[in-house]
Amino acid sequence: MKKHLKYILTLTLSLGLLTSCDKGFTEVNTNKVDPTSLAASMVLNKAIINTSYLDGFGTLGMLTYNFGIVQQIITPYGSSLSGANYDQVNNSNTPLVWQNFYRNVVKQLVSVIDQTKSDPLQINTYQGARIWRAYVFMILTDTYGDVPYSEAGQGYTTEIITPKYDAQQDIYKDLLKELDEASAALTTAQPAVVTDILYGGDVAKWKKLGYSLMLRAAMRLTKVDPAMAESYVKKAVAGGVLQSNADNSTLRHTSLYNNYVANHLQAREKTNFYLAAPFVDYLKANNDPRLPIFAVRYVGAKGGQEQVVGRASSDPAVQIGMPMGYNDVSISTTFAANKVVSLWDYTQVNLNTVLKLDSPEFHVTYAQTLLLLAEAATRGWVTGTAADYYTRGIRANLEQMASYGTTIPEATIKAYLDAHPYNAANGLDLINTQYWVASFLDGNEAWANFRRSGFPALKKNPYPGSEVKGDFIRRLPYPDSEIIVNSGKMNEAITRQGPNTLDTRIWWDKK
């Protein structure tokens, strides 16, 4: 009996101790610092930031292809930097847009849309995500052609791990529908999402962005579906496009959160990339006041170590762009004719203005929008004159230079505009060549509009080892990783679209 009593007392004491220890157990073991979920608006911000890449290395896709194809920035070096400079496939850099967007941006946007689509209190975040998704997929499909779209980013939510490749024609139709619906559905009835990284929750500006993207997307179709293009151009104008540089879609940077193209060129690639001769020559020939903002030359530098402040000059008179078609050995044959002492003596991008570490990046600008309206006016699709839109578009970009810390004086702007009036006889050339300049450092848009319009009238890269059979690189090939993870769907796209090469034209890119 004593043993049983002792056992009962011991058990009771133990249970009491256990109960005492359990008090506050949940509170003590709950992490009150790290978040367990993220607000949809913050995930949308992350997607917007990631669209401009996650680090400096991601910018190599832009530096080695987009900028070189449109002959604005070029490198004479091969190996990891080869691409448009040699008109060759570089399997390290052609997949960078694909990898960043599908692994990060698309996944984040799909998450935001799924989280907010049924929540009436998050209607503006939902519509904003739809607008940004359209922007992202324009870049993806403009780069590769047919791509996963309708089933993209659903590996977690619906377990679709081998998404189909949608035809670009179908993608563009849906993008226009999405932009139309999302822009119209944005409402001022909801409180502003003040954490919004683009516009601080300003719904009116988001609407203008949506309709301006609609205008851009519609103008892509000028050669393949002019009726649809005209219809959506008119819808965009009626909805209300960007009205000033204050409406520009801009990603701002700081000394901590860098412009990654600047980051890359300020560091390991500083001596490797140069402004291309066609770009510099055009700006010089037209006495363009943007040249000293875009350019710097380390006059007489015989090596990277001599590219120092004491040699730096942004004087337009001394700028010499690097000619197309040479590697780091054959470029030496150009020195005497161009009056430079080495390849390091050619003009580079100005790292103290447009590519400071804290310089902004632009997605959609007032200048680009006005120049697209100028072309639309030549086609009779909008009211107003092409000359007026053209002049205002140039002015807008000249004034946009203030964003880089350099304001062009009004007298200089007026003198440039007076010297470069619109001429209907070569209107499309004038408009789209100015679009080329206004899209400097926006490689995705500069390349897309160059393919669509055929302007400026650049000459084919004469590099002797070119793998391009036609005139210019028309698209980038699908990543090799797709052969492993989604070859069946990829091959369906290749059968429909054409060979997986640099020469194959995407749907809207017609001769």
Image (cartoon, rainbow, N blue to C red):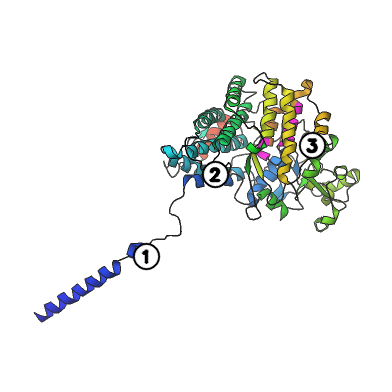
User: How many other residues sit within 10 Å of disc 1, few (<14), some (14-19) or many (≥20)?
Assistant: few
Assign the magenta stretch its main secondary structure: helix
Q: Where residue 28 is drawn, which disc sits there?
A: 1
Horizontally, residue 493 falls left or right of residue 26, namely right
Q: Residue at x 74, y 33 (%)?
A: 395
Label located before the other in sequence (1 or 2): 1
Label located before the other in sequence (3 or 2): 2
Query: Considering only vertical position in the picture, is 238 above or below 492?
Result: above
Q: Quadrant of the C terminus?
A: top right
User: Which residue, given by chain and number where applicable, does mark 3 sit on?
Assistant: 410
Of marks 3 and 2, the one in the foreground: 3
Foreground residue, 363 or 421?
Answer: 421
For the residues labelled 1 and 2, say whether their Cβ atoms are less than 8 Å apart: no
Give the x, y percent position of residue 459: 78, 33
User: Which residue, given by chain and number where applicable, does mark 2 sit on?
Assistant: 196
Kind of residue at disc 2: Asp
Kind of residue at disc 1: Val
Give the x, y percent position of residue 88: 70, 42
